[in-house]
Every structure is written in structure tokens, then in C-alpha cells.
């Protein structure tokens, strides 16, 4: 009788452990299924998104980038130690008319970029603030020349100082 009671309690203990393990597995599987379903709905666009996110994404998708052919190789404004800057440059804009004007006025724009870049010093361009300042100067100079629209962003694809 004592043996039967021990076997009964042992079976009940195993049953309780098995039940809790099964419950845990079921909960984990359901949670994973819910998570995967939510991600699928979110990525497929079936779930509504916040209006601010949609407007930011549409602005990003509307931006076009024009990359100037060739590079810009200029002497920097360092009289004591001759230094060179090599740039490969891209410009971002949202109006397609700007691209046509950039292509038509390519020579004029390249000249303006060379003039702005060659007025910089090695000391200025070795700092991140100097590179950002150069971007702003180039952006302003390009926008002074363009008439059909504006360039919104300058991208350095290659930036080498020697």
C-alpha cells in the first residue's frame, strides 16, 4: 500500500511537471505565432501607420540624387604646404526639373564647386565641422546658380585630402 501511494504521488508529480512544460510550450508557440503574424501585417502594409511616418517615407522616396561625373581635384588654400582635395560629389533634390538644369549647367556648377572647395584649408577640412561647412557652402553656391529649383542635400561619395 505504501508502494502504491509512492507510485501515485510520483505519477502525479510527473503529470504536474508535464502539464506545466506543455503549457509553457503552448504559450511560447502562440506568442511566436502572434509576433510573426503582427510582423507580416506590419511589413505588408495592412496595418495603418502613423501619418508622420508615412510623410517622412514619402519625402525620402521622392528625393532624387544626381552624381557629378568624374571627380573634383583642387589645390587647397595652404600656401606653406601644398595640399590637394579630391571630391566625388552628389546632390539631392525633390524636383525633377532640377536634374535637367544641373545637366545643362554642369560646367558652370563644376566651376563653382571647384572655386568653393579650393578656398578651404587643410586644417578646416580635417574636422567634421569643416566638412559640414563645406557642404553648406557648396549647397548655397549651387542654389545661387540654379533657377528652376533648389538642391536640398550634398553628398560626399569620395573625400580624400593629400
Image (cartoon, rainbow, N blue to C red):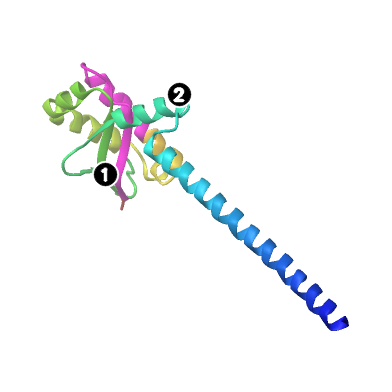
Residue 148 in the magenta stretch? The answer is yes
Looking at the image, which is closer to me, 114 or 143? 143
Residue placed farthest to the top in the image? 147
Residue at 40% across, 40% down: 43
Would you call the spot at circle 1 few (<14 residues within 10 Å), some (14-19), or many (20 or more)? Answer: many
Q: Quadrant of residue 121?
A: top left
**Up-down: is 4 above or below 40?**
below
In reply to whether residue 87 is colored magenta, the answer given is no
Q: Is residue 71 left or right of residue 46?
A: left
* Residue labelled with disc 1: 87
Quadrant of residue 122 within the rendered picture? top left
Circles 1 and 2: CB atoms closer than 8 Å:
no
Q: Is residue 100 left or right of residue 124?
A: left
Q: Which quadrant of the view contains residue 42?
A: top left
The residue depicted at 41 percent of the width and 27 percent of the height is 54
**Disc 2 element:** helix
Residue 99 image point, x, y percent: 18, 27
Residue 60 location in percent, x, y? 34, 31
Q: Earlier in the sequence, mark 1 or mark 2?
A: 2
Give how far across and how far down residue 3 sits, in percent.
84, 83
In the displayed structure image, the side of residue 74 where residue 23 appears, left or right: right
In this picture, which residue range is highlighted in magenta? Answer: 135-160
The residue furthest right is 2
User: In this rendering, is residue 113 above or below 84?
Assistant: above
User: 98 or 64: nearer the eye?
Assistant: 64
SS state under label 1: strand
Name the outermost residue toward the front. Answer: 1
Nearest to the observer: residue 119 or residue 49: 49
Disc sitting over residue 51 in the figure: 2
Point out residue 41 in the picture as x, y percentages from the top left corner: 43, 39
Identify the residue at horizontal 24%, vertical 33% (top origin): 113
Amino acid at each position: 500500500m505504501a508502494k502504491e501511494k509512492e507510485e501515485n504521488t510520483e505519477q502525479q508529480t510527473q503529470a504536474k511537471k508535464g502539464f506545466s512544460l506543455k503549457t509553457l510550450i503552448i504559450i511560447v508557440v502562440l506568442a511566436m505565432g502572434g509576433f510573426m503574424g503582427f510582423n507580416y501585417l506590419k511589413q505588408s502594409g495592412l496595418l495603418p501607420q502613423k501619418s508622420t511616418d508615412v510623410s517622412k517615407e514619402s519625402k525620402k522616396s521622392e528625393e532624387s540624387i544626381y552624381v557629378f561625373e568624374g571627380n573634383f581635384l583642387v589645390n587647397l588654400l595652404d600656401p606653406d604646404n601644398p595640399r590637394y582635395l579630391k571630391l566625388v560629389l552628389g546632390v539631392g533634390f525633390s524636383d525633377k526639373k532640377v536634374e535637367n538644369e544641373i545637366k545643362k549647367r554642369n560646367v558652370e556648377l563644376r566651376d563653382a564647386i571647384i572655386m568653393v572647395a579650393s578656398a578651404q584649408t587643410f586644417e578646416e577640412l580635417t574636422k567634421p565641422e569643416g566638412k559640414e561647412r563645406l557642404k553648406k557652402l557648396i549647397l548655397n553656391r549651387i542654389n545661387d546658380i540654379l533657377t528652376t529649383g533648389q538642391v536640398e542635400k550634398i553628398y560626399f561619395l569620395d573625400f580624400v585630402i593629400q
